[in-house]
Amino acid sequence: MQNKIQEMDEDINISDNVPNQANEGLEYLSKEVVENTTPRQITTDTSILKQKVEESEMTKDEMDKVTAELFVTLIKEGGLGLSANQIGVPHRACIVNVKEPLVLINPTIVKWGHVSTDTAGERIVYVESCLSIPKTIKKPKRTMRVSHITIKTDNLGIIEFGPDSTKWKQGGNELLKDEGLLESVVVQHEIGHLDGLLITDDLVRYNPQIEKTNTYGRNEKVMIKNVDDDTTMYIKYKHATKLMKTGNYELL
Ligand SMILES: [Zn+2]
């Protein structure tokens, strides 16, 4: 895996575009559910946003309700994705509206890369804004993301997201023009919300200082700890960085 960081020429705000396909997303739902749904307030309270939302069983009615609320709110506010905890709904669910409207129920990232082709994800520097952090809508933040991801969901099974072609490797505008890559970043943004991670957090935001002062070689072994169950692993730094990006591991 190459660990090359791509730089960009100009900033593009990924959350500030009005969704052009969001209405199609409502075809997932019954008319009655949509008509009885009002947009919800998007929270900006970081003490709420920083809490991880655990997986939970959802009934069909609960799924329809949260899906309708997410889409109706996204249409009103404009954006490419929204997570349930941003609108005060305590379920691990989100919507992503880049190529087509997608509802993800209990989504989790299972690989920073693609499982089917055994492709490793490459780190990229992107630019994002967040409806829950209004100042980033005017002034987007640089973030560190991974090009290819594989996620699992209750409703759609295993799904892979990643670039449409290899042009993005040229960096700059080519990177930002790749719709598949944009979708991959939005999925990471929304699942990040469900894990309590914001684009302003150290694990997500791009920090050139950290990149420069990194003293570990990519193949040097380091000890990391799972913050949930305190188990440790002694693995190569290049693998450790990917795990640490999930927010579930820290360097010892
Ligand atoms: Zn956000």
Image (tube, rainbow, N blue to C red):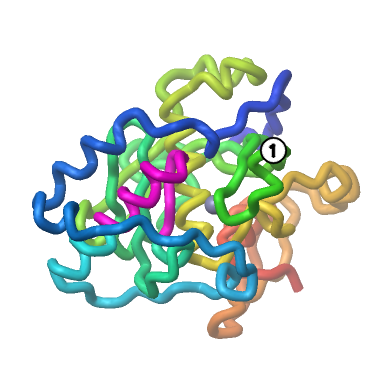
In which quadrant will I find the C terminus?
bottom right
Q: Nearer the viewer, residue 216 or 180?
A: 180
Q: Nearer the viewer, residue 4 or 72?
A: 72
Q: Position of residue 73 (x, y in %)?
A: 38, 51
**Residue 91, placed above or below residue 4:** below
What's the residue at 64%, 20% (across, down)? 171
Amino acid residing under circle 1: Lys
Ligand 1 near label 1 (Cβ, under 8 Å)?
A: no
Majority secondary structure in the magenta region: helix
**Residue 16, placed above or below residue 228:** above
What's the residue at 54%, 64% (across, down)? 43
**Residue 74, placed above or below residue 125:** below
What's the residue at 30%, 31% (across, down)? 21
Q: Quadrant of residue 172?
A: top right
Q: Position of residue 34 (x, y in %)?
A: 18, 53
Left of 67 or right of it: where is 41? right
Left of 127 or right of it: where is 94? left
What range of the chain is rendered magenta?
67-83
What's the residue at 35%, 71% (across, down)? 91
Verify whether residue 118 appears in magenta.
no
Left of 8 or right of it: where is 61? left
**What is the secondary structure assignment of the residue under circle 1?**
helix
Find disc 1 in the rendering and name its residue.
138
Numbered-mark total: 1
Q: Position of residue 182 (x, y in %)?
A: 48, 32
Q: Residues within 10 Å of mark 1 (few under 14, many from 20)?
A: few
Verify whether residue 76 appears in magenta.
yes
In which quadrant will I find the N terminus?
top right
Q: Position of residue 144 (x, y in %)?
A: 66, 44
